[in-house]
Amino acid sequence: MEIEDVKKNTKLIIDGVLYNIVDVDFTKPGKGRSIYRLRMENMRGGGVIDRTYRSGENVNEARLDTQNEQYLYREGDNYIFMDVKTYDQHPVPGDLLGIKKNFLKEGMEVVMLMYGDEPIDVTLPITIDLKVIETEVSTKTATITPQMKSSVVETGYRVDTPSFIKVGDVIKIDTRTGNYIERASTGK
Amino acid sequence: MTESESARLSRTKANLARRALIYEHIRAFFKERHFLEVETPILAPAIAPEEFITPFRSGSLFLAASPELHMKRLLAAGYERIFQFSHCFRRGERGRLHNPEFIMLEWYRAGADYTQIIEDTEQLIISIAAGLGVENHETIYQGQKIDIRPPWPRVTVRDAFLKAAGWDPVAGPDSLRFDTDFVLKVLPSFSPRRPTVLIDYPAPMASLARLKPADPLIAERAEVFIGGLELANAFSELTDAKEQEKRFREAIEKIKIERGQMMPLPDKFLEALPHLPPCGGIALGVDRLVMLFCDASSIDDVMAFAEEAA
C-alpha cells in the first residue's frame, strides 16, 4: 500500500515484524515532499518504534482475518479459545489480551483477529455482565456522594463499585476501561 | 470518546473570534498601504503544475491550490498592489498543521523583490500583534516566548543545511534528501525565541521565482518560520515567459511519470507573463498565523470544520 493511505491502526509488516500503527505525524514543507513519521507498536512482543517515510514510498500492509471463537478455559498463562467452525484450538498468551483477560467467561464467543494461524487480538463486547462473588461489607452511612468500595466478580477481577452492591448482584463493566457502569440485576 | 459538535464549536469560539479580529487587522494593514483586495477563481481550467502539490479535480477543472497565477495576471494588466484571502485545496495534506482546504493570504507588489516582501511580512506581523494587544513585541507560543521585533534573522539555505545537516544543497541539489533533512534536522535547529527567514533556495526548488542575477545557482525565494510553523513563502517573481514555460513543461513531465496524471499548460498565464513587471509576492498560511496568535497546537483548533468534521 502507499504510505499516504496508512492510518492509525493500520497493520504493517516491516522486516518480517507485525506492527500496529499508533500514530501518524504528517509534515510537509509547502513546496516539498510529504514526510510521514510513523509510531508503531510491535504486535507480538510489544515495544514501540518510530520510522520516517516520504511520499511515494510503499509499505506492506498485513492481511488480517477475523473469525468467531469460543473461550474455553485458562491453562497457566494461556487462555484457550476454539474456532467455532473448525474446532481448532488456539492458546493465547495473557500478555496479548491485556485487560481483556479479566472479562473472559467460559463459553463466551469473541471475534479473534488472526495473522495467518496466529491469534493477534480478541474483540470483546464493549460491556459485559459479571456476577459479584465477593465484596466488602458496606458501612451503612447515608451520604449524598455515593461511597465506592472494592468488589470481586466471577472472573476474579477486582473492581470499584458503589457501596450498595451485594454478593450475587450482576454488574455491567466497560471492557475497554475495566470500570463499573451499573447494576444489571440484583442477586437473591 | 469523541466530543460532540456543539461542545467542539463552543471550545473553538474564542479562537474563531480572534481569527476574525486578525482578518480585520490584516485588511487595515493593506488598506493603509493602498493595496487592493481582489478575488480570483477557485475553480479554473489550469493551475501551476507542481511536482509535490496534488490538486483536486472537478470535472475538467481544478480547485485552486494557490491564487498565484491569477494574481500575476492582474499585475500583468497594471494592478500594482494587490492582496487576497483565498481558499486553497491540496489533496492528501492532513495533519496537525495541514487541512486539505485552507486559507492563504497572498500579496504582490510591483517593483519589489523578495527582500522587500519579507519586510512587508515583518511589518504585518508586528502590526497584527499590536492590534491584538501583544505587549513588548513578545508573543507566547506553546510555552515559548518569541521576540517578534524586526528585523528577523536571515539565514541562507546553504548555511542552515551546512550547520544542521552537514551538506550544501546549492552546490549539489538533492530534493529527496532536502525534504527529510529539512524536517528532521534543519527546522528543529532554528532558534525558538525568534522568527527565522530562510533565504536563497537552490535554483531547481522555486519554479516560479527569479534566479539571482549574480548567482544562477540560487533562486530568490524566502520562507518565514515562527515557533516551528512554516508560515509564508516569498519570491522575486519570475517574469521570463520562455523560462517559465520550460519549467512548467518539466514539472508536467515529472507529474506524468511519477503520479500518472496529466496537467495542462497554464496558457492564459503564460500569455500574460511578458507583461508582468518586476515584482515580489508571498503566500502566507492564515490558519497557521491564527494558530500562532491563539497559541493553538493544532490547525483543528482554529477552524470550525476541519476535514473530518466538515
Image (cartoon, rainbow, N blue to C red):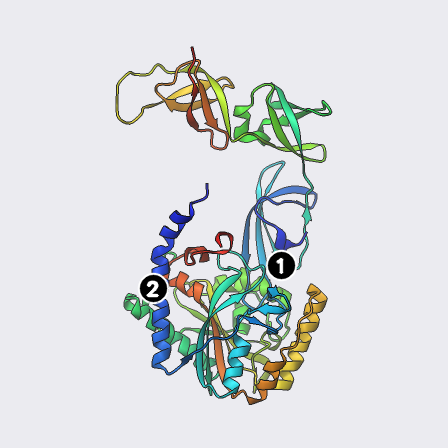
Badge 2 density bin: few <14, some 14–19, many ≥20, Cα 10 Å: many
The answer to whether residue B137 is above or below residue B210 is above
Asked whether, in this view, residue B276 is left or right of residue B174, the answer is left
**Amino acid type of the residue tagged 2 in the rendering:** Thr
Q: Amino acid at mark 1?
A: Arg
Q: Residue B102 location, x and y as percent?
A: 49, 64
Does residue A65 appear left or right of residue B32 in this picture?
Answer: right
Q: What residue lies at 34% left-to-right and 75% top-to-bottom?
A: B28
Q: Residue at x 61, y 69 (%)?
A: B61
Residue A166, x across and y down, in percent:
39, 15
Residue at mark 2: B139
Q: Secondary structure at mark 2?
A: strand
Q: Nearer the viewer, residue B208 or B99?
A: B99
In the rendered image, residue A187, in percent from the top left (x then y), is placed at 43, 13
Task: State the residue in front, B284 or A78.
Answer: B284
* Secondary element at image label 1: strand
Q: Quadrant of residue A125?
A: top right
In percent of width and height, residue A33 lies at 60, 64
- Residue B151 shows in this picture: no
Label ID, residue B18: none
Chain under disc 1: A
